[in-house]
Amino acid sequence: MRVSEIMTRDVRMTNPNQTIRDAAAIMADIDAGAVPVSDHDRLVGMITDRDIAVRAVARGLGTETPVGDIMTADVRYCFDDEDTEHVLDNLGDQQIRRLPVVNRDKRLVGILSLGDLANHGGNSHAGAALAEISRPGGQHSQTRM
C-alpha cells in the first residue's frame, strides 16, 4: 500500500513567526497534537503539543513565543508514493509517530501517523513500530536541545 492511499490530506500549517498560542489554537481546532511549520511554501519544521509543554511552558516561556524558537527543525518526512511498510520501519527507527508527507517536488501534501497505518491493515507492523518508537531516549528526545 502507498502512503498516498492512507495519509491525511487536509493539513493545517503554522509559520515560524506565529506564536505558540496560534499553534496551540490550530491544534485544538483540528484535534491534533502536531502541526507542520512552513516558511513561504517550504517545510521548515514541526511543532507538537509536547514541544509547547516541554520546550516552552516548562522553561517559563510565554504564549507569545515564536513557533520558530521551539519547533523541531530537523524534519523527517516521507514521500506520497512510498510503500507504507518501509515508512513503518523508518518510524520505529527514528522514534517518531507522525511524518509530513511530500510529493517528489517536495511540496507538503499530507500527514501520516502511526494511527493511520494501524487503521489500514498494518496492525502487526504498527505494533512493532510502536514498540521501537516507545524506547526511552533516542534522537528526538524532548530533553535534548
Image: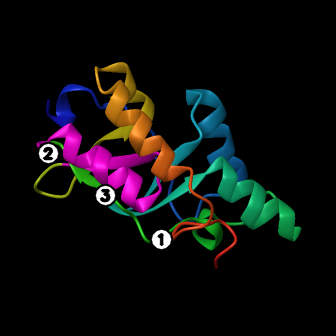
Kind of residue indicated by mark 3: Asp
Which residue lies under the disc numbered 1? Answer: 73
> Is there CB contact under 8 Å for labels 1 and 3?
no
Tell me which label, 2 or 1, sits earlier in the chain.
1
Kind of residue indicated by mark 1: Ala
Q: Quadrant of residue 75?
A: bottom left
Residue range in magenta is 81-102
Residue displayed at 62% across by 61% down: 136
Tell me which label, 1 or 3, sits earlier in the chain.
3
The C terminus, quarter of image: bottom right
Kind of residue indicated by mark 2: Glu
Which residue lies under the disc numbered 2? Answer: 82
116 on left or right of 84: right
User: Residue 12, image x and y in percent?
Assistant: 45, 39
Q: Residue furthest bottom?
A: 145
User: Residue 95, image x and y in percent?
Assistant: 47, 57
**Which disc is residue 41 wearing?**
3
Q: CA distance from mark 2 to mark 3?
A: 22 Å
**Which disc is residue 6 wearing?**
none
